[in-house]
Structures are given as C-alpha cells and as structure tokens.
Image: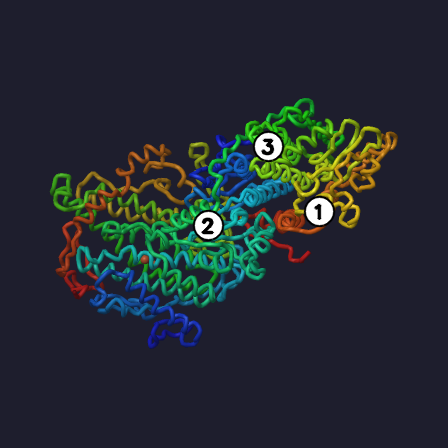
Amino acid sequence: MSKVDRSGKIPNNVDLAGDKRLQRALEHWLPLYMEWWNDMGPAGFQTNDIYLRTAVSIESGGWANFDYVKMPEYRWGIFLAPTDSTNTIGFGDHYGKPTWTEIPGEYRGNLRRIIVTQADTEPASVEQQRFLGTIAPSLYDMRNLFQVNVEEGRHLWAMVYLLFRFFGKDGRDEAEELLCRRSGDEDKPRILNAFNEPCDHWLSFFCFTHFTDRDGKFQLASLAESGFEPLARTCDFMLTEEAHHLFVGESGLDRIIKRSAELTRETDGDPMKAGGIPLDMIQRSINYWFTYSLDLFGGEISSNAANFFAEGLKGRFKEKSRYEDHIMKEGVKIIPQVVNNVVVEEQIPYRNTINEVLRDEYIDDVQRALRKWNRTLEKMELETRITLPSRRFHRHQGIYSNHAFDPEGNLITEEELKKNSDRWLLNDEDNDYLVSIMHQVIEPGKMANWIAPPARGINGQPLDFEYVRL
Amino acid sequence: MEPISFQVDPSRYRHWDLEKEGQVMRIHMNVDPDFPLRDGYELKLNSYDLGVDIELADIVRRLRFEHPEITSLVISSNHDQVFCSGANIHMLGISSHSWKVNFCKFTNETRCELEDWAAQADVRTICAVTGPCAGGGYELALACDEIWLIDDGNSAVSLPETPLLGVLPGTGGLTRLVDKRKVRRDRADVFCTLAEGFKGKRALKWGLVDEIAPRSIFEEKLQQYLDQIQQQRPGRQDRQGIVLGPIEVADVDGVRSSSTLSVAYQPEKRTAEFTIEVPAVSGAPSTPAEIHAQGDSFWPLRLARELEDALLDLRVNRKGIGLCIMKTKGNLDDILGWDRILIEHQGDWLVDQILHLTTHVIQRMERTSCSFFALIEQESCFGGSLLELALACDRIYMLDEEGVQIQRSAMNEGLLPMTTDITRSECRLLGEKELLESNQGNYSRLDASTAEQMGLVTEALDEFDYADMVPVAIDERVSLSPDSLTGMEANLRFAGPENLESKVFGRLSAWQNWIFIRPNATGPHGALTLYGRPERPDFAWDRV
Ligand SMILES: [Fe+2]
Ligand SMILES: [Fe+2]
C-alpha cells in the first residue's frame, strides 16, 4: 500500500506521483473541475473561511482534520481504504477467487456503467443544493451544508480517479461528461431522476441528505465488497464521509420535527402562524423524497442486478457479515406484482431481485430513524406520528411505476391519485411557503424559528462557534 | 394454437399512436406491455413482438394507399424512458426456431417495405430517437432515411446482441449498418460489441446517426426540417387516398378462399394449391379517376393484397406444407387487359403503388420457405403479371396441348422487378444472353414447345407425360428434407447481382438462423436462453 502524498496538487494514497499518465490526466481535469465548482458549486461564500474537515489520510483521525478552509482551496484528494486482508471475491460465480486489481475485460462495460452512475450523483447533489447557503437557518447548518458539498466534490474525484486509471479514453470522455450534465437541465439532465428534482429549501435538503444520501450509503456499501478491488476500497472510504451526510439529514429532520411539535402546541395546532412548518407538510416532504429515493435502487426484477451479482461486481449490503450463502444461484424471493389490476405475489429467482433485497435493507434503516422522530413527537405529547408510505406509492421506476397506488400501497385509479396528490406529496404551495419562511441567520449560535438547535456543535466546538466567517 | 391474423386496422392498434399534421405523418411507438401476441411474456420498455410489427406493417401499407399526400414520416416513441429496446427477448426465449425465423423475416420485410415505399413515393423518413434505442429498435431507425438522436447524455443507439444475447445484432444482419449507412467496418465492429452503444457526438461522428440536438431545440429543429421537406415536394396536397378495407377470407373444408384466389390445403400430402381466377376485363375502369373510384375493390389491388395475406397465412399458420402449386384460371386476353390498364396509367400515384405492391408480394413469395411449382394447363391464363408469378416459382410445368398458351408483356420487362432489381427473365437467362434478347419485346401467344425453347418453362409435356410426371415430381418434392430444400431454393432463386435487400435476407437466413440454433445462443447454457436469468452463459469456445 502506498503512502499518503500530501505534497502534490492532489493529496492521495494511490501513488499518483509514480503514475505520470494518470497524474497528467487528473491535473488536466482539475481546472475543468474548478470551473464546474465555480459555476455550479455553492452560490457565494467561496471566499469565506469555513470550519471544514478535510481527509488527509486514511488512518483513524487522518480523514477528519478540522480547520478553516476556503472552499475552492479544499484539498480534493484520492483515498482508497486499506486492502481487505482476505483479498478474495466475496460473492457470485467467482466466489473465493482472488479479487481483481485490474479490470476484467468482460466486465469493463458493466463496471463503467456502475461507476459512472454513482459518480454522476456526486456533482448532481451539489448542483441541487447550490442556493441553500443564502437561506441557511444558522451558521452551524450552513457549515454542514458546505461540508456535504465539498465531500460530494471529493467523491466525484474518487470516481473520476477510477475512470482515468482503468478506462482509458472512454474514462476520460466520461469524466468530462460528468462535468457537462446539470441537475434538472432539460438538455443535459443528471442520470438518475432524484438528482434532477429541485431542492429549494432546507426541508428538502434534510430529506435529501436523509433519504437520498442514504441510498448512496447502501449503493456504496454494496460496492465496497466488489470483486474489483480499487472500486471496493474507494467506496469503503467514501462511506466514512457519507455517514456525516446522513447525520446532517437525520438530525436536521429531527430538529425540525421537534420545533414543529413545539410550535404546534404553542399555536394550538397551526405552526404556520408562528412561521413554523406543519407536521403534515413534513410528512408530504418525506413521502416525496423517500419514494424518489426508492427509485434509485433500480427495478425490482432486474437482470442487470443479477449479472452484477453473478459477476462479483456488486453485492448486497454488508455481504460478508450479514449473509451466509454468497452464491445464491438457487432460491427465490417473493415480489408482489400487479397482474390484471390486482397485486399478486410472484416468485422470482433470487439473483434477479438483488435490487429489492437492497431496498429492503434501506427501508429497515429508514424505519429506525422514523421511530426516533416519533419518540420526539411522543415526548412532546402529540398524537401525530410520521409514517413511511408504501414502496409502491409514487414510483417512477420499476414494476410499480405504471400503476397508481395510495400511500398505503393499495391500487387506486389515476383520477384518485391526481385528486389526492397535493395531500400526499410536497406541492407547489408547500414549496412556496417553505421558501418564504427561510431567511439566512448568521448570528453565531442563533437558529431560525422553524428549527430547534442541535444537541451539540461540530468537533466539540460550542454551538455559538463561528462555523462560517462571513 | 390460434392462427395468427395479419389483418389489422388503425382502430385496433394497441402499440402505435398516429398523428397526421398537414403533410407530415408522425407515428409513435407506444407498446402496450399487457398485449403480447402470445402468452408468456410482457412487452416491456417498448420491446416488440410479431403483433407489434404486424401493426407497423399495416401502417406502412396504409401510408402507401391511404396517405399519398404526405411528404415526410417521423417515427418516434411515446414511452417516457426508452425509444425502443428491440425485439422482446423473453418472446425469443420461449419461441420455437421456426417462429423466430418467421418473426425475423417478417420484421425485415416490414422494414424493407418501409424503405421501398419511401423511395417509391418520395417521402422522407426520419427516425426521431428520443431515448435509448437498442437492437431491433436501431434497425428500425436504420430503415429510415435519416436518424436524429436527442443529445441528452442518456439517449444512445446500440446493438447489444453480441455482448448480451450471443446472437447476430439487428434484424437485418448488420447489412444496413455497413452497406446502407456505410459505417466503417472497424467502427461497426467496436459499436456492435459495446452493449451500451454510443450517445450524441460519438454516434454522430461515427456515422451511426445523422443529426443530434439537445432536447430544448430538438423539436423545433425537426419541425423546420419537415417544413423544408414539404416545400421541396409541391403538388401532392390534393391527392386523395383510398381506404383499404378488410380482406374477407373464408376457410371451408380445407380451402381458404378470398375474392380473387383460393388455396386448397392438403395437409396429408403437404401441399397447397393456389388458384387465381381472373375476371373478365370488360367493364373494368379505363381512366385513373375510375380506378380511384373503385379503390380497394379494383381487381389488381385486391389480388395483390389477398395473395400476400394467403402467403403470410401459409408461412405462420400452416406448418408442414412443403409445396405450393400455383394455378390460374381465366383467359389471357383478360389478364393482359387488366395489366394494360396499369401499364397505360403509370405515373398516377395509385397505379404506381399498385405496381409496387404487386412487386413486393411476388418478392415475398420468393422469400417464402416453401417450394413453388407453377402448372400451366387448359384454362390457365399465365400472361404478363401472372406469368411473372410463374417465373417466380422453382419449376414451371406446361402442358403441351392445343389451346394451352402463355404470353409475355411489358410486365415481364421491368415493371415487377426481383428483390435484386433485375427482371426474372434476366435472372433465369443469366447465361443465355441471346435467348434473353430474343425474348424481349416478344408479346405473342406462345405454345408449350415455343415457351420451352424460349427458356420460359421448365418442361413442356404432352398429355401422357404430363399425367405421369407432374404427380411424381410433386410426391418427390415433398419427400425431400425441408431444411435442405429451404437452403437450396434460397440459393437458386436469386442468381445474379446482390443488393442491400438481397443481402439483408441472405445474411439473415444464413447467419441469424444458424446462430439461433447453436448451443451458445439457445442451448441450456446459451446466452439467449439465460438472458434475464440469474445464471451466466457458458460458451463452447471452438470457432465453427
Ligand atoms: Fe457522495
Ligand atoms: Fe453524500
């Protein structure tokens, strides 16, 4: 394993200095990346000092160096987690064989597709969140936003490294394309739908980091045991950063729910009177982002997923520790499907349902957070509870996307769906209201009225610490 | 199994949306996944089966006759995720070999007819690819004059069959890629092995598409182009199409009959006897206006449509029939009279299209995997267009007897060309230039021995020999290996030059069909068999 090189333009532990071709490619890409960052990264704040953590090495503690940094000077580095001691492929038809350190030719296309799809999400979310700094509810939150943004930028670097290192000219083309697509752009949209949805206010931001970044966690985790070792090690390291993004989302929503509950009590049920966010609006936002995020797992029945698993490219969540049979050539999984307008359960070969297996794990994880929020509501002695809609509701991908379902998962008519969708999903009126109540709060330690303060500050700093120097 | 009907009409389309605006026809592929032609698969992601293609063939046919005023055709998709993902893999997976072969043949004929019609009617065809377009979907695009691809970082054209399914890419065996579009062979090689295909700029640069445009201006740019096409084709806006009504077919006691012909099936003998009856020409329309007024009941048009319907029925619904015996009934003056109406009014769009359709139908017969013998006997009327039908057969037996005659006409000299663009006489007499020349312009009545001397019939036989030999020839024919015959006939029927169309079918029958039956595609561990299943294919590595 190569040492960490902190001296070059691009901090790394992949011996960039020893690979001139790669180094040149990345150094060529750096200005293009900066151009993208300046155009599409956070609007404003580029000259401000921000209390950020920077990964400078992979040793414990090394990946979390806190200091004031101007965002454009952030050290976007390339880090791979240490090699797994076993060095064998953990699942699929090549189970037990040595992992690949170079790309197996027959899987080049599939790997490229996996990597590009993951890579595309990284800059996309930065684009979606670009104006949120100007309406941040506190310096603490503003700093968290920027932390997420720079790390998504670094994740892009990590993926681009793989493209440059292993995919030659095709990889270089893809890397440039990654900087050309734009979230929500009619002509050059990002690859996945959820990453083209507008994220105009902080309720959406927290839902995004909670639900959509969490998809990222499961995708990365399932790639972190890939038979293609450089991909596995890259994703493994990204997961450490991703955990913070999820924390931002989960705790952000918790703080909004807490504050909304307080305001609900204070205002006899109408927190809007006090500039707060009603609980039903939060529920609609959750319905919206949760379902868009479900789409990201791909089709319920997918030969691609089966192939990726068989080929040892993409496993399940924590494949090694949570599963016993890593081959799964036999076996079926029950998938409810719509046949002649009724939902019936059908047996599908297990490998073809790998996306659904991953989606199951994701939903379990989301449920756990939900229980926490509901405890908050319980403590506030409110009757309302937050719920998760059915996985069939409001889908744009997979076997349910051509049918109308209510949030409980019952088949309904298109008309019924249309009639109720404002009641079930974040709507224009909600968005207008949410934007209208969100104003920048820059006094250290102060919070906007619609959100409760966090339990503690960043890196042991007090809440009124100057997280962003304006 | 329920027999497949090839008849459909716009009110019953399930898979296509049509939209005519002025002189532009737009057709949108919008496959209903819940209505496959057979049970056992779903038509997801705008994938197609024979049922989808039967509708497309009907659209093309109606464009020919019902919409003569249009100047351009745009093919696009109403599916929000893909343009077209090609032939349905699960359908191929569960289909018998002969079904797959007939399916591929039919879809190719549809695409060839689309190309022929566009050239003959001078209609510009544009495929507007607004999403991923794979396999047979790209073949459909290739069948258009131009391919426009939306440049959105997602839409791509691809031929993923080799890497994903282990079969020959496209529907036309790659001929359109290198022969029609003239994509360089090495680039085509790269393209065909890359499952995800090419997007935007690269697709344009390598000649896989003709035009790219981002979504925001795609429609506007296309519309401008369509306007331009229309301006370049003045003078057809007043044309009135005719309506193609349904073909009435009766099937009684093994005889399938329609208004112009009957087909008597003898399954135990594995033969089918086609008899075309020619009505008197007196009282037939004599001006274009009268022809238009008769519309789809005009006899030559009826005959072409009904003969085609009978041939399609034979291919798909009549397994085991090995030999078709072609007979005609009527008199030579009548058939030559009908032909003369068409010959004299060439240049009228409807008359031209009837000639093109007749050409297409006779070519279809030549591409049918079945033996054809023409029998010229008393009461036969093999003249002009019907003589052409005889010349399309594998053998022609003519009774040498007073009153049995045939007659050539202009119909035999280029109005009804073969797939390869030459006449059947040229093809027959490839090595006998002088004989061919003496044939040209000879429109006199010919008895059997003269016809034999002129190379027009296989054998002229007197009454006794005819009665002895013809039944024996028939019995012998149906006893031979059907596979061998299919290959033998396909190799004998098309002597002379090759062109795009003949290559499409040549490659198709030789290569696609071979790959289809190889274990690497359809064996228990073949790529096509295992597609969509959790297991990976296991190839036998020897190159055969
Ligand atoms: Fe990320
Ligand atoms: Fe993230």
Residue assigned mark 3: B4
Task: Look at the image and tell me in which quarter the N terminus of chain A lies.
Answer: bottom left
Residue B241, percent from left and from top:
51, 33
Q: Which of the two discs, 1 and 3, labels the residue nearer the N terminus?
A: 3
Tell me the amino acid under the disc marked 1: Phe
Q: Nearer the viewer, mark 1 or mark 2?
A: 1
Please determine whether, in this image, residue B329 is positioned above or below residue A174.
above
Mark 3 and mark 2: Cα distance apart in space: 30 Å
User: How far, Cα to Cα, is label 1 from label 3?
Assistant: 29 Å
Amino acid type, residue under disc 3 in the picture: Ile
Residue occupied by mark 2: B132
Q: Residues within 10 Å of mark 1 (few under 14, many from 20)?
A: many
The Cα–Cα distance between marks 1 and 2, rounded to whole angstroms, is 37 Å
Q: Position of residue A332 (x, y in %)?
A: 49, 43
Residue type at mark 2 is: Pro
Which residue position is annotated with label 1? B494
